[in-house]
Image (cartoon, grey):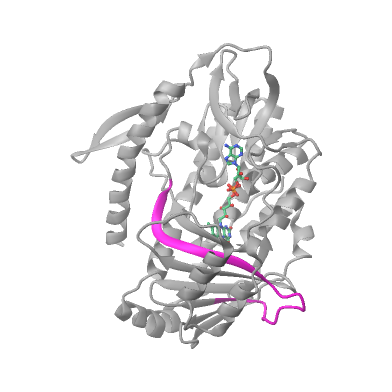
């Protein structure tokens, strides 16, 4: 553990210096952040403290909005629908021409389902996706090391893999037709003289917003402007795909993991005809962006060519538009070092605030949790006026941080353990740790999360 933390700390120091450059360049752009150096135990570190935006005068061609959400991903749409349920209208700006239609699936655990129920879309989605009963772990030679049934460990556990496209479409279907503005890429933000935030879109459109909720994902431009460093590459990449069986898929409803040396894979049935698979492998750098599906397919197959044949079969049955490769990143929200989740009436939600590796299947679940916690606090501030929006956002940040930071660290550590390539350590994992020591209950403890209905 100590080695992991040291490694992480080294990465952080490297990130800190790049943040300094980043922040310096922003000062000339928008005077958004105020970097300051401070000293701890003989080290020099950068502390980025968000301060006020530069003040600009209002112009006649600005569109006025009360609440703007940037990003029509899971966090953005869930927040828009949650606020809408409480009678609060928002405008969602999405850089894409449409909702993300490609992509694969996400495994959602019971905390994710509780959030979807609170938002009012849980049952619509349940009816389309299989409930996963358990999980099986195999070694690369196909030997089953261990299997679990989720309900044996926790009667209330609910696990389903959900197609991202369907999740997004279902959420969007709950919004009025004009709620999402597509092809609207945020380019910059500035503070207006009336205290509002001026959003400048890439196509020249200017929108003045009283409240800005940034759900703009892992490379969030708003988080950058608030002084957050770029997410940190963790040394692994993942191939993902959604295999299609027009005549019906043959698998039992369970998650199947296969552990190799520096490579691990998994697959899980999503519906009667679709099966999600992934292959995660070590790589010293994220490598060039590859979008050609035939190259992606070839590279994925190469990694598991001597593994149980069902993986190769799944790769072959994957349509071109659902095979992707992603480099895995995260960002640790160090206490008193990382900027807060909000500054004034601007707040970050989901991956924009806390990118985490997918090793616990919690990124989207936490984005959904965020959206509900934020909605409640914001609605209370707007309706009762007992607290300011600024304080509501601060309260959201303080409530969510103790949930998010440990999960981000845990996800990283789980990934690091599972990606070991040392043959001796892998043998200990396959013959002792997994068959005899692992217990599912503690492993899924983090899925216990309660919140009141909206
Ligand atoms: C390999 C992998 C597997 C995963 N598996 C799981 C899983 O099984 N379970 C789980 O819970 N999570 C999983 N996750 C995590 C999950 O995908 C994310 O946590 C989730 O997508 C976060 O949602 P978001 O809305 O915050 O960001 P996103 O889904 O990235 O949405 C951001 C949106 O903002 C838009 N945007 C960005 N910049 C701008 C701009 N300048 N202007 C306008 N719009 C903009 C984007 O186009 C996008 O639509 C996985 C992640 C990876 C990488």
Instruction: Name the spot of residue 269 as percent of width and height, x first.
Output: 66, 73
Q: Residue furthest right?
A: 177
Q: Is residue 62 above or below residue 38?
A: above
Q: Residue furthest left?
A: 42
How many numbered tags mark residues here? Answer: 0
The residue depicted at 30 percent of the width and 38 percent of the height is: 17
Instruction: Name the spot of residue 31 as percent of width and height, x first.
Output: 43, 21
The residue depicted at 32 percent of the width and 46 percent of the height is: 12
Residue 307 visible in the picture: yes
Residue 149 visible in the picture: no
Quadrant where the C terminus sits is top right
Q: Say whether residue 88 is magenta.
A: no
The residue depicted at 62 percent of the width and 46 percent of the height is: 75
Residue 325 appears left or right of 212: left
> In this picture, which residue range is highlighted in magenta?
231-256
Q: Is residue 368 above or below residue 358?
A: above
Quarter of the figure with residue 49: top left
* Camera-nearest residue between 78 and 177: 177
Q: Main secondary structure of the magenta part?
A: strand
Q: Say whether residue 246 is magenta.
A: yes
* Camera-nearest residue between 390 and 206: 206
* Camera-nearest residue between 77 and 97: 97
* Camera-nearest residue between 306 and 249: 306
Residue 208 appears left or right of 412: right
Q: Is residue 360 above or below residue 304?
A: above
Quadrant where the N terminus sits is bottom left
Residue 24 appears left or right of 390: left
Instruction: Name the spot of residue 195 as percent of width and height, x first.
Output: 57, 17
The residue depicted at 41 percent of the width and 70 percent of the height is: 418
Residue 201 appears left or right of 400: right
Instruction: Name the spot of residue 207 as percent of width and height, x first.
Output: 65, 23
């Amino acid at each position: 553990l100590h080695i992991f933390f040291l490694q992480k700390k080294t990465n952080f120091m490297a990130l800190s210096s790049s943040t300094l450059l980043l922040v310096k360049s922003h000062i000339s752009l928008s005077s958004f952040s105020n970097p300051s150096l401070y000293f701890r135990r003989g080290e020099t570190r950068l502390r980025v403290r968000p301060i006020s935006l530069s003040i600009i005068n209002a112009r006649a061609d600005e569109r006025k909005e009360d609440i703007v959400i940037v990003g029509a991903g899971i966090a953005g749409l869930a927040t828009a629908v949650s606020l809408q349920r409480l009678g609060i209208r928002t405008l969602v700006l999405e850089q894409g021409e449409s909702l993300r239609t490609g992509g694969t699936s996400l495994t959602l655990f019971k905390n994710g389902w509780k959030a979807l129920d609170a938002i009012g879309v849980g049952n619509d989605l349940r009816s389309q996706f299989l409930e996963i009963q358990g999980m099986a772990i195999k070694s690369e030679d196909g030997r089953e090391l261990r299997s679990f049934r989720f309900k044996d460990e926790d009667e209330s556990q609910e696990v389903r893999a959900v197609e991202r496209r369907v999740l997004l479409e279902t959420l969007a279907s709950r919004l009025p037709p004009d709620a999402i503005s597509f092809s609207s890429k945020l380019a910059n933000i500035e503070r207006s003289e009336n205290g509002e935030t001026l959003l400048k879109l890439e196509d020249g459109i200017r929108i003045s917003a009283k409240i800005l909720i940034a759900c703009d994902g892992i490379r969030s431009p708003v988080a950058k402007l608030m002084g957050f460093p770029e997410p940190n590459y963790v040394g692994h990449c993942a191939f993902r795909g959604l295999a299609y069986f027009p005549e019906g898929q043959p698998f039992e409803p369970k998650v199947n993991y296969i552990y190799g040396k520096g490579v691990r894979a998994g697959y899980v049935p999503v519906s009667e005809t679709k099966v999600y698979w992934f292959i995660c492998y070590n790589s010293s750098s994220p490598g060039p962006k590859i979008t050609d599906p035939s190259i992606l397919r070839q590279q994925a197959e190469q990694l598991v060519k001597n593994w149980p044949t069902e993986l190769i079969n799944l790769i072959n049955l994957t349509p071109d538009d659902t095979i992707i490769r992603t480099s895995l990143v995260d960002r640790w929200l160090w206490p008193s070092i990382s900027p807060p989740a909000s500054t004034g009436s601007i707040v970050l939600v989901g991956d924009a605030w806390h990118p985490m590796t997918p090793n616990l299947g919690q990124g989207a679940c936490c984005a959904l949790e965020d959206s509900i916690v934020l909605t409640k606090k914001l609605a209370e501030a707007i309706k009762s006026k007992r607290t300011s929006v600024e304080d509501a956002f601060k309260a959201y940040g303080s409530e969510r941080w103790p949930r998010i930071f440990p999960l981000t660290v845990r996800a990283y550590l789980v990934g690091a353990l599972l990606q070991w390539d040392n043959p001796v350590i892998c043998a200990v994992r396959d013959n002792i740790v997994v068959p005899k020591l692992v217990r599912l209950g503690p492993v899924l403890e983090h899925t216990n999360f309660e919140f009141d209905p909206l």
